[in-house]
Image: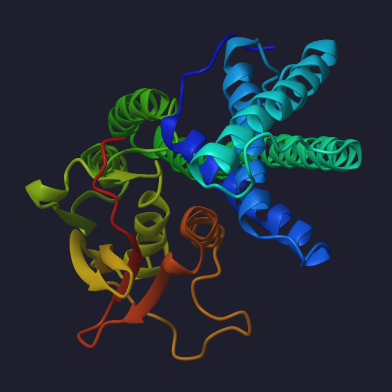
Amino acid sequence: MTPRRHFNGISKLRHYLQVVAFTLAVATLQYAFMPDKPYGPPVVYSVLIGTFTWAIIDLGRELIPSAAETGWPQGWQGIALVVVGIAVGYLAGTALADALCVHYFHFYPPGTSTTGADQRTSILITAIAGLVGSYYFYAIHKSAYLEGKMAEARVHATEARLKLLETQLEPHMLFNTLANLRVLIGTDPARAQHMLDRMIGYLRATLAASRSTRHPLSAEFARLQDYLELMAVRMGPRLAYTLELPEALQDVPVPPLLLQPLVENAIRHGLEPQVQGGHITVRASTRAGAEGPLLVIEVNDTGAGLPATLPAAGPGQSFGLAQVRERLATLHGSQGTLELIAASAGGTSARVTFPLDSSQP
């Protein structure tokens, strides 16, 4: 059960217009079965009875604690509200319609009274229409609630999926780093100590970012710089890098750990196979898209480039890149893409594109 809800005037107006349309349909059906009588009286009676019934039920339920699933009172209170609404709606609507039809519209001469058969028919029509209308609004409220819950569940499922993908990426990076650290401990203890200090700083930043499914692009670049510094301890002068982030894009929200797999791939498959190493440039920019502005992030390297003969699975099928593609598909569907492009001057460009979200994370 929920307490009294916030009054939504637009929603009530929409409900009332639906009621008016329904009452006009009822009046038209009545006229179709009694073509010898004028069309005006059924319209007046139907609209007024429907109006009073709607006002008592739809406005009255705002005063009674209601179920969150339906927006309607539960148990005997809901039944009583509908019964009272139909009864009072019929009596008040009929009384006012009698006065209008006789004294204002002059459909009937003064002193005209409704026959017993007409009253019974009118009561039956009012009861059936009232029950049908009440059930209709009950059903659409319940349907809207369930759709909202489904949307909420989809959001939670998406967040959980992204978290799962992120936790899969973390061990992948850590295992690679620890393997390198193990080698350095035996060959260069001083560099191993420096690498360990960098890894501690990186993990501290990672822990702070793991509490959210999105963080500012500036935080993603800072986290990426920590990772590159960590790799620079191992590779020394064989690794150089440049990070280019325009000030206008610093607060754009992005998923954590989106760029690191791209840089890791560039180092492993581009720079490490070359004796001289190479340079990595990470650049963020925007471009126009068919459905709005797009954020474009490029990871360019001067490494060995894509192999001349590609495996059957195609390029970019490593664990990290597969995870990036899956995260983009989870968040943005077909609008989130990852492309691997062979640079004309040598090296590879990994380009991530997805809709630009300028809201604060």
Q: Residue at x 44, y 90 (%)?
A: 308
Q: Determine the residue positioned at 53% across, 86% down.
A: 310
Give the x, y percent position of residue 30.
77, 57
Q: Position of residue 325 (x, y in %)?
A: 50, 62
Left or right: 17, with 255 as reference point: right
Q: Position of residue 208 (x, y in %)?
A: 37, 23
Residue 131 location (% of width, % of height): 81, 36
Residue 9 position by quadrant: top left
Numbered disc total: 0
Which residue is located at x 68 percent, y 51 percent?
Answer: 42
Q: Is residue 221 left or right of residue 20?
A: left
Q: Is residue 46 visible?
A: yes
Q: Quadrant of residue 191?
A: top left
Foreground residue among 221 and 58? 58
Q: Could you tell me which quadrant the N terminus lies in?
A: top right
Side (left or right) of 11 relative to 267: right
